[in-house]
Image (tube, rainbow, N blue to C red):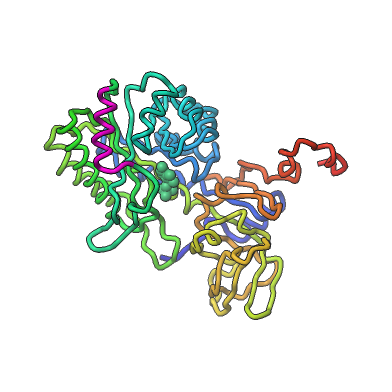
Amino acid sequence: MEKKTFVRKEQIEEIVKKYPTPFHIYDERGIRENAKALKEAFSWNKGFKEYFAVKATPNPYLIDILREYGCGCDCSSYTELMLSEAMGVKGEDIMFSSNETPAEEYKYANELGAIINLDDITHIEFLEKTIGKLPEMISCRYNPGGVFKISTDIMDNPGDAKYGMTTEQMFEAFRILKEKGVKKFGIHSFLASNTVTNEYYPTLAKQLFELAVELKKKVGVEIAFINLSGGVGIPYRPEQEKNDIYAIGEGVRKAFEEVLVPEGMGEVAIYTELGRFMMAPYGHLVTQAIHEKHTHKEYIGCDACAVNLMRPAMYGAYHHITVLGKEGAPCDQVYDVVGSLCENNDKFAIDRSLPKIEVGDYLVIHDTGAHGYAMGYNYNGKLKSAELLLKEDGSVKLIRRAETPKDYFATFDQLDIFDKFKF
Ligand SMILES: *Cc1c(COP(=O)(O)O)cnc(C)c1O
């Protein structure tokens, strides 16, 4: 599929007059259409709820848009819980899916009335010690081990993942929790990441539904919900085909009818914790080419770097690049598109075929709406960029200002040595 930008060159030339590059910009229309489609695709399930994975894009303006479509927040840390509380999200609208959780985070999650999702059987005791009486409803995270396959394709390797409880531990945990007075149970599992196939959720769902039936029969517990978590991916590469969320919803429905309904479990709610699928395609990192360099390779140096988008440096992830205004031009040059960190892995693209780039051109790096800004850091004293929202009416709103040196120095005790900078 051709990768198109949601902004044109002329728009960016206007925007940079007020907000200089680099910045992340998000497409309100795209976010809304996608959130609506997800809701429709699972409307067959009465209790369906998407808990947006806050870590993917922790910006309250963006999460507020999702809340209009019934989304809650999936949190995994103290500050993510704070962000949710500040936005007025509380109680069962928060899923707390953490791991290696500090006691004060459990305490806070419990005070907010969040649904607590335990990553390990030992956390039952830890939680009880921390908060006293356990809540009425608890979820446990499942990891069957081995590899996760769809027919013969290996999708991911849960056996290597630090998360979740084994099958035996799930039964044991549910027994213990029931004994301790827990009344309602959830099952959570995240077995493959960034899947670009309509089969991931239905395959996972079937496994979890079968486990739920066994847990109900053998332990005698009430299963309130099944949380399919994240992992529905997006086509970062032009040759990949987009997931069809309606086909995914229908696949999960079939498994539900096949496994749960005959067992009298037709009331079980389906939850999701999607991050990437909800936001990634609706964010661009916009950067300007500021240098070109001809040595052993051809380089384009831009004003963004890996602190703005870490995925290429960290995972070798592909992010498509469009040179604004040159959409139709032949891709007859081969470049490394690089940032300014003193790290040779600071490359947004390696040996990428692109149109001829001039210094001053604006580049759009695609699919940065999730795990983009959020993974940012301050290495080399680089500052985090602004985040902008392109609204449906075409106007642009600043939804997070860029960092300034003052932010960078703010955690020193002795701020007075910086006084002369008057920032
Ligand atoms: C990261 C994460 C998600 C979101 O994953 P995506 O790949 O962005 O969909 C959901 N749940 C948990 C517990 C996570 O850690």
**Observer-nearest residue: 320 or 229?**
229
The answer to which image quadrant residue 50 occupies is: top left
The C terminus - image quarter: top right
**Observer-nearest residue: 8 or 260?**
260
Q: Is residue 202 magenta?
A: no
- The residue drawn where x is 36% and y is 22% is 134
**Would you say 93 lies left or right of 418 here?**
left
Q: Position of residue 364 (x, y in %)?
A: 58, 61
Q: Position of residue 225 (x, y in %)?
A: 28, 34
Residue lying furthest right: 420
> Taking the image as four quarters, which one is ligand 1 found in?
top left
Q: Position of residue 66 (x, y in %)?
A: 45, 38
The N terminus - image quarter: bottom left
Give the vertical position of 50 relative to 86 (above or below).
below
Q: Which residues are magenta?
A: 165-179
Q: Position of residue 92 (x, y in %)?
A: 39, 27
Give the vertical position of 170 relative to 176 (above or below).
below
- The residue drawn where x is 11% and y is 37% is 262
Q: Main secondary structure of the magenta part?
A: helix
The answer to which image quadrant residue 187 occupies is: top left
Give the vertical position of 196 relative to 331 (above or below).
above
Q: Is residue 168 magenta?
A: yes
